[in-house]
Amino acid sequence: MHFASDNAGPVHPKVLEALAAANEGHVGSYGADPVTAEAVARIREIFEAPEASVHFVATGTAANVLSLASYAQPYHTVFCSDVAHIHEDECNAPEFYTGGAKLTLVPTEDGRMTASALRETIAAEESRGVHGPQRGPVSITQITERGTLYSRGDLTALCEVAKDFGLPVHMDGARFANALVDLDCTPAEMTWKAGVDVVSFGGTKNGLMGAEAVVFFDPAKAWEFELRRKRGGHLFSKHRYLAAQMNAYLEEDLWLELARAANGARELLQAGLSGMNDVSFAYEPSGNMMFPTFTAGDHRRLFEAGAVYHIWGGTLDGAADEARLTARLVCDWSTGPEAVDHFLDTLRG
Amino acid sequence: MHFASDNAGPVHPKVLEALAAANEGHVGSYGADPVTAEAVARIREIFEAPEASVHFVATGTAANVLSLASYAQPYHTVFCSDVAHIHEDECNAPEFYTGGAKLTLVPTEDGRMTASALRETIAAEESRGVHGPQRGPVSITQITERGTLYSRGDLTALCEVAKDFGLPVHMDGARFANALVDLDCTPAEMTWKAGVDVVSFGGTKNGLMGAEAVVFFDPAKAWEFELRRKRGGHLFSKHRYLAAQMNAYLEEDLWLELARAANGARELLQAGLSGMNDVSFAYEPSGNMMFPTFTAGDHRRLFEAGAVYHIWGGTLDGAADEARLTARLVCDWSTGPEAVDHFLDTLRG
Amino acid sequence: MHFASDNAGPVHPKVLEALAAANEGHVGSYGADPVTAEAVARIREIFEAPEASVHFVATGTAANVLSLASYAQPYHTVFCSDVAHIHEDECNAPEFYTGGAKLTLVPTEDGRMTASALRETIAAEESRGVHGPQRGPVSITQITERGTLYSRGDLTALCEVAKDFGLPVHMDGARFANALVDLDCTPAEMTWKAGVDVVSFGGTKNGLMGAEAVVFFDPAKAWEFELRRKRGGHLFSKHRYLAAQMNAYLEEDLWLELARAANGARELLQAGLSGMNDVSFAYEPSGNMMFPTFTAGDHRRLFEAGAVYHIWGGTLDGAADEARLTARLVCDWSTGPEAVDHFLDTLRG
Amino acid sequence: MHFASDNAGPVHPKVLEALAAANEGHVGSYGADPVTAEAVARIREIFEAPEASVHFVATGTAANVLSLASYAQPYHTVFCSDVAHIHEDECNAPEFYTGGAKLTLVPTEDGRMTASALRETIAAEESRGVHGPQRGPVSITQITERGTLYSRGDLTALCEVAKDFGLPVHMDGARFANALVDLDCTPAEMTWKAGVDVVSFGGTKNGLMGAEAVVFFDPAKAWEFELRRKRGGHLFSKHRYLAAQMNAYLEEDLWLELARAANGARELLQAGLSGMNDVSFAYEPSGNMMFPTFTAGDHRRLFEAGAVYHIWGGTLDGAADEARLTARLVCDWSTGPEAVDHFLDTLRG
């Protein structure tokens, strides 16, 4: 009953197999190896972007902030949602990597920026000449930190706002695969065809050990990114082991299979919860994450039974048994139906 | 015949086994897992430092610059050798992570700073009050970028100079194990007993996939380091896989075994080269690295036979066959006697 | 009829006289001169803080961001109002000088943070361990960017909130004198007696050419500040001319006289405006600044008559004559009754 | 007998007059005033550069580091002499403003880089791909920190080296006027006609209170500079007082007159010293600065008689009377013949 994070589960066995398969003999370091070349080619292929500049790093924070630093000058502000990971959970890494750019928060109800809120927020900046920050990139998280999903129309509309102001668009795709299988579209449709310029293409939360790709659809950004990655200490010397993870991920659509498994576990759990009288949802669930609300007494019974998850926006300590609190429940590829059933059974009491 | 780098060889099989063994079920992310707890305990034990603050990162650059940033203020200068990795090969990462501190280079003959040169260099700084940078940490690389080794007496003397000025000491131990087996001393003797405050304890160059430990002997640095690591994008969510590598490394002294294998290959190669008339050594070899000098014609024959290594401080292009050029030859744990023999036989013609 | 800014008026003649008086012979540079020593002593005296660390810079932005950088680590967030100058009008200078710290905005109605809003905002941060920024200094602007005034009780309450969380307090006192004469208290009462740790003591907006003091009530910050000032390029070589301005400012309470003149002009203007039927005030006026609201037609008549000021939070272009728009009107020491009368007469039509 | 620095003397009276003349009524702040427009036009005129982007700041460090930051990316290294002010005397301000770029030092004998040494130093960088810093701007100090002068041919040769590598050239002209009158050429000839891209045009050391111009011959740099200046806290609100200084400076060639006076005082002093048996010069004097060497006993007699200057590269404390030590003697526009005679007479004994 571990629903705390999609970082908590194991790596898919095929990933370990790929690491072992790559573990032969001497190859060039720092990416000058055939495993890396293969991974780059695969990424370009699935994105239908033969010219894309593709780079690998080990963490999602690195992918996000190196991407942003390629577009944001120190005197810029980055536009993102008020609950964006880059704002809330990266300990000032965007400010660090951009040399001190600011983040301007777009208010949201459920983690999703609306095109009009984005437009209003952008318009309000850069009205003070040299005194305020200048407008920089827009960052969109798909799926959002609240488990909500942008439709393809939503994405296109957000990108159009950015383009109206001449601003580049970054997508934080830490849960890219989970979104994609929900949208049932192609990677190209969810990114460059909608207007995205660079995407953090996540793997770690979906069965890899620690590997993310940064994909620039404009190849002109390649060399600067390489320098910034090295300067950030994020260039792997034994680079083949990052690339091998990515190859296993993309081989025979493993990545989509894993996302379907995670999303499926969430759907199963959601279906069970939806049938209960006193359970409501703080946000509309999608992907592999949801935020159901129920009583403190129920939370206590779950924790006593060994469930692991986070209470969201509140605290269980001292709460009356009938107080309603929200859980953040995250499934991963390895979340089995037993865990889901155990959770639901416990909740039913 | 791959002698280009100790980053080029494979990961030791026991490391892959440890990854597989760690790959069970759900655990806490970001280091809150038992595999990490075990790795921390092991590091403390081998360093005889039960209070040490121990942290894991995936790259040597991250280990170095996060360590330095914990001691160097932006208005400081870091003292290091004129060929230090932090100066030559980290694309300004130290300047980035320290917020703009400077590096002051101590001139060396062979990569090793002498205590008197270090003292003279430190004394020359901070003579201009607020106008120049202030004195910051001293960084020592063991073994050096030229394959040379500091004796325990050398290390103690350097640390004493630093302490005379009240400065903390960092050790870049990317090849810590290679040095240790040469010195035949304990990790404690090569670090805190000599006066080192923080060490980048390398694993990647010695058979790991990508794992380094940062060890502060003063535990007061722990929390700040955690924040700086997160802010640098270097905190692994699936942290157990960094720790599992380190556990395999330290289990039954695998790390020392691997270093002895790499150093042994270097000794074998050196012995063969030493017996040749026209081979000299640019620096006194130690550890797993050496810089032999021989003719361009010989280099050409080796490259034609498939040898892979770097020409050092010169270029083969257009050189006369009798011109003497230096090779940088690096062995790793997997360098077999066949590769050594093949190299020597080819050189003998 | 120039009400655009207190930066637009002339320097008081006594300041020019003081510059001329200081312009004799050779003295030590970089602050090692008797004029500077006198200015430091005067500041300590008026603040009743004989141990205070006192430094001079030429701009308010420099004063603010160097002060903040002395307290905020790069992984911190600074708490300030949602309309703070450091947030809106310093083009990311706080982020630059702190090495990438964040600003967390406390929502306000009129530029003034309430103690409860501050407490709530601080409490909400640092709830995510290493993932979010850590709590850093609180910055209070007195008088605020909306021309509103914190009472002594307000200041004490805000500082108490900060102290409850162990956070230092910075005061942006760009209009320190304007606030002080309104509150009719001592500089000590408005700062360290209320709990302020460091103040940007403004002079430029109140009759100086370009001189601000930074006053740390804890002298331990002195040397670090000196280094950060130099590193920011803000150490004046001919330092006596900064200090001479400050001496003229403090001599025979010129600073209070000038603030009373500016505040008096505002009161006169306010009194006239208050008597008009259709004029309202967006915020409660104090100090030397106010935000009256009246019709676009009236604004147009004023601009045609030569008035200079900013329309606030809207635009006159295309507005219907009867649309109501807010003016930002700022008086300075040199604002004469003729300008006020001319403005009022024009408005009366 | 004050020869410690050209920062120690008074401001020229015409500068104070210009400040008083500018001190009339209300004008636009932040540079939107007619005094500033006039100063910009004057600078463009004397540089024969009608399109140049001209900006004013109050300190030489600000001028230098903001200029460099407009060209140097964080992953670059700046090439400068091993005694450059930006290296030795700006407390890491270049590293700060560039976001962590490095400085690579070109070895010099007397503060002057030779074209061949510059070429060799540049060639040696950027040989390690992504691992080392990339080549950034070249910075030339005219006259150098050792009082030596680059000829026009020297400047052209250095700029040609930079252009061969595609690198921009910055000139630190803190003593621009002193060099110009020695070279007897036009400002255009000493800058853009030789290949300089941006110059820190100093005024503070030559009779101003605190005003320097940054002149980009490529106007495309203008807006970015404005943003970086604001973000550095270097934009003056009462900007007319910076500009008024510059206008006084350029009016009727006051700047050249002041430089001739300072250089003349140096020549007089040098002539007197040259006639003495035991006086030698560490570097070939030019401009307003020289480094004569004579005995410790003589230094002691001078200091006892009230002379003020710095001992260079050594210390008088404990030196034997016959030990030879070098003085750094700097003249300014106000250095009178009496001070020179008094110095020479005292030295003669």
Image: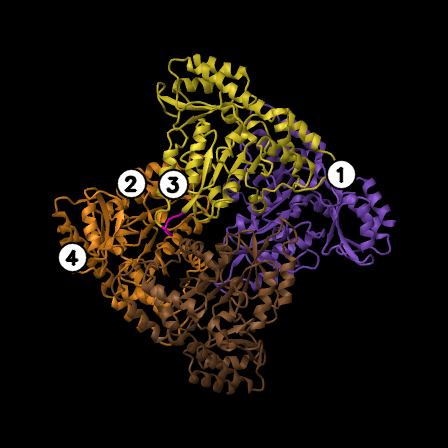
Chain colours: A purple, B yellow, C brown, D orange
Callout in the foreground (3, 1): 3
Task: Give the image location of residue D151, x and y in percent.
Answer: 23, 47
Q: Secondary structure at mark 3?
A: helix
Mark 4 and mark 3 residues within 8 Å of each other at the beta carbon: no
Callout in the foreground (1, 4): 4
The three-letter code of the residue at mark 3 reads Ile
Magenta stretch contains residue B131? yes
Magenta extent: B129-133
Q: CA distance from mark 3 to mark 2?
A: 21 Å
Task: Give the image location of residue B246, x and y in percent.
Answer: 62, 32
Chain letter of the residue beneath label 4 in the structure image: D
Mark linked to residue B122: 3
Query: Residue drawn 19% across and 54% down?
Result: D266
Is B220 located above or below residue C320 in the figure?
A: above
Q: CA distance from mark 2 to mark 1?
A: 65 Å
Q: Can residue D62 be seen here?
A: yes
Crowding near the residue tagged with mark 3, few <14, some 14–19, many ≥20 C-alpha atoms within 10 Å: many
- Nearer to me, B49 or D153: B49
Q: Secondary structure at mark 4?
A: helix
Kindly identify which residue carries mark 2.
D108
Please name the predominant secondary structure of the magenta segment in the image: loop
Kindly identify which residue carries mark 1.
A334
Kindly identify which residue carries mark 4.
D342
The three-letter code of the residue at mark 4 reads His
Q: CA distance from mark 3 to mark 1?
A: 56 Å
Q: Secondary structure at mark 2?
A: loop
Chain letter of the residue beneath label 3 in the structure image: B
